[in-house]
Amino acid sequence: MAEVKAWGAALRRDGRTLALVPTMGYLHEGHLSLMREGRRRADGVATSIFVNPTQFGPKEDLSRYPRDWEGDLARCASAGVDAVFAPEPSVMYPPGYETYVEVTEVSQGLCGARRPGHFRGVATIVTQLLCLFRPEVALFGEKDYQQLQVIRALNRDLHLGVDIVGMPTVREPDGLAMSSRNAYLSPDERKRALAISRGLGKAQALFRAGTGEAPALLEAIREELRAADLREDYVELVDAERLTPLASVRPGQPARLLVAAFCGATRLIDNQPLGG
Ligand SMILES: Nc1ncnc2c1ncn2[C@@H]1O[C@H](COP(=O)(O)OP(=O)(O)OP(=O)(O)O)[C@@H](O)[C@H]1O
Ligand SMILES: CC(C)(CO)[C@@H](O)C(=O)[O-]
Ligand code: BAL
């Protein structure tokens, strides 16, 4: 902790800028795209690898979340990361820890409704990391679209002044959004998981062909989920910033389709812009 503060302070003293990429490790090309962009935008790049216990529900996968410390370090080095911060939970949440950050509106629906307390945990750890590193830039993936909006809100409301950069979702060649949790999928589930990006693509095509009504767009996605035997957690059309549900969307209107679905026991999320 002291080392991190000293390193950040030394950068600032030299007038150099810092980009931060917070992660939970088990790094893939999605993470590396954030690090490379950080490299382009700032003089130094730091990554945190921390499986944050406060953002996991009691029945979620905290204890089996995939880890690959050696591989992660090599990947960070290949992406030009200067410093890796991988604290123990007791460093971020020492005895007596009592400060939590809640973003009240954009945290409410979607993943926030299905994972109670999740965004409180995310907002708390991201605020800690931003305060600790005091970066000029912090990069996050659009794959976790609601999370990105939560982080933008806390950065705005707490006057942190960080340039929050959202980066496009990196996909496997067949369209599946890269995610550390893809490692949980069996070969059969891996094939079926494609229904999510395929459904989003079909809804997008419908929209381009002139359909703007939410029920028709959402049904196109649900059809794909059902055909692949995926269990819907939610499928929604929302305003791209506030994340409030939309009954329909016009060309030029900033809107987003978001999906969460269980493929076997694994919960996957994905989303796509529509309009805008
Ligand atoms: N496919 C992706 N493309 C771009 N950014 C991504 C992608 N996957 C994750 N990220 C971003 O990387 C950062 C760290 O995410 P995290 O470590 O949770 O990875 P993850 O693959 O999303 O893991 P999980 O499977 O637990 O959701 C977040 O900002 C997240 O949005
Ligand atoms: C932003 C984050 C690192 C906070 O733990 C996590 O939610 C993630 O990896 O997306
Ligand atoms: N990538 C989001 C972190 C989580 O699902 O807990």
Image (tube, rainbow, N blue to C red):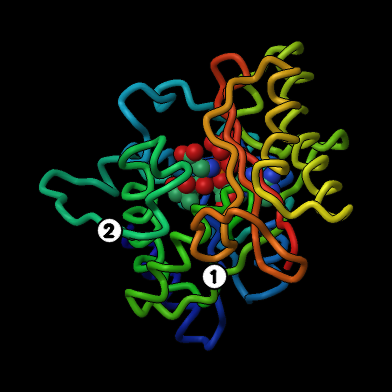
The residue at label 2 has a CB less than 8 Å from ligand 2:
no
Res 208 quadrant in image: bottom right
Q: In this view, does 248 lie above or below 134?
A: above
Q: Residue at x 33, y 57 (%)?
A: 1
**Where residue 253 sits in the image (x, y, percent)?**
69, 69
**Where residue 95 sits in the image (x, y, percent)?**
13, 44
> In this orientation, which residue lies closer to the viewer: 272 or 223?
223
| Residue named by callout 2 | 101
- From the viewer's perspective, tell me whether residue 109 is left or right of residue 201: left
Q: Can residue 76 be seen in this view?
A: no
The amino acid on which the numbered mark 2 sits, given as a three-letter code, is Val
Q: Which residue is drawn at 79% across and 52% down?
A: 211
Disc with the residue nearer the chain's start (2 vs 1): 2
Element carrying mark 2 = loop
Element carrying mark 1 = strand
- From the viewer's perspective, tell me whether residue 196 is left or right of residue 61: right
| Residue named by callout 1 | 164
Q: In this view, does 236 lie above or below 193?
A: below
The amino acid on which the numbered mark 1 sits, given as a three-letter code, is Ile
Say if mark 2 contacts mark 1, CB within 8 Å: no
